[in-house]
Image: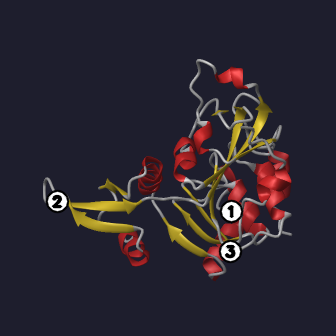
């Protein structure tokens, strides 16, 4: 069954108040074409969960699309802390729950595996534990085997994942070339998965080849060449730094 839809139709899959996650990190393989369309839609008051977002989150904040954030870090790399992120978190305009990279990965893996939580140990002793226990996303428990304390990270299950890929067929099988980051887990953990693709390929492309993301997890596919610009797309194009500098200027 073809899941190929227009960008406008895919945008309608994102609802007011949804928690979203996006592909890539910082300046690399973010679904910017979708993000620009989301900015131009009426959808607002979104939650945003990710490990290391950058330009994508900053653009959503600049245009008041996101009201809640859970992330381990937000970075524009050598350009520093994203200014809208910093301003809106410090002023309380958006709610921010700081995560750790390891705990986020544990939570998104739990969501992908369909289990309620994933244990981790390295975060014990951090003040982040108190913050997360307060909102119910982490819990300290006893290891039933050793009796030692262990941290349980509740499964992260975003409402919508938007993932930009190199190739996809109409059924939703998708291929990412180069670093995957947590995108395979995000697709499996999320309730709705929107794939934007540099290229739509025939179904036969995946014969005898394991897709990075299986069609079973995908809700919609959008053909969107250069859909990560101005972030990079491994093996296809690099970051457009001039465009990045233009985009992060104040409105």
Give x and y (percent) for residue 180. 57, 37
The quadrant where residue 236 appears: top right
Residue 145 x, y percent position in the rendering: 14, 53
**Circle 2 or circle 3, nearest the eye:** 2
Q: Estimate the x, y position of residue 199 in percent, counting from the top left.
A: 79, 32
Q: What residue is at 13 percent from the left and 59 percent from the top?
A: 147
Image coordinates of residue 191 in percent, x first then y, are 58, 56
Q: How many marks?
A: 3
Residue 240: quarter of image: top right
Q: Secondary structure at mark 3?
A: helix
Q: Residue furthest front?
A: 1
Residue 173 in which image quadrant: top right
Which label sits on residue 87? Answer: 3
Residue that carries the numbered disc 2 in the rendered image: 148
Q: Earlier in the sequence, mark 1 or mark 2?
A: 1
Residue found farthest to the left? 146
Drawn side of residue 92 relative to residue 229, left or right: left
Q: Which residue is mark 1?
A: 82
- Above or below residue 133? Residue 203 is above
């Amino acid at each position: 069954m073809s899941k190929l839809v227009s960008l406008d139709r895919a945008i309608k899959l994102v609802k007011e108040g949804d928690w979203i996650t996006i592909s890539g990190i910082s300046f690399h393989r973010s679904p910017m074409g979708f993000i620009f369309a989301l900015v131009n839609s009426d959808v607002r008051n979104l939650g945003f969960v990710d490990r290391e977002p950058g330009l994508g989150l900053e653009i959503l904040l600049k245009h008041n699309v996101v009201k809640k954030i859970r992330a381990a870090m937000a970075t524009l790399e050598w350009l520093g802390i994203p200014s809208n992120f910093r301003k809106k978190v410090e002023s309380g305009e958006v709610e921010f729950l700081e995560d750790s990279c390891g705990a986020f990965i544990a939570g998104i893996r739990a969501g992908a595996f369909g289990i309620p939580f994933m244990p981790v140990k390295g975060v014990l002793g951090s003040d982040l534990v108190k913050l997360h226990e307060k909102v119910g996303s982490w819990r300290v428990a006893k290891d039933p085997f050793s009796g030692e304390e262990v941290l349980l990270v509740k499964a992260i299950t975003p409402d919508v994942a938007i993932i930009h890929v190199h190739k996809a067929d109409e059924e939703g099988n998708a291929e990412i070339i180069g670093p995957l980051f947590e995108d395979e887990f995000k697709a499996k953990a999320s309730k709705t998965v929107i794939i934007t693709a540099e290229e739509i390929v025939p179904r036969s492309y995946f014969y005898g080849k394991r897709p990075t993301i299986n069609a079973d997890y995908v809700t919609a596919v959008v053909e969107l060449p250069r859909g990560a610009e101005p972030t990079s797309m491994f093996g296809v194009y690099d970051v457009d730094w001039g465009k990045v500098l233009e985009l992060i200027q104040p409105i």
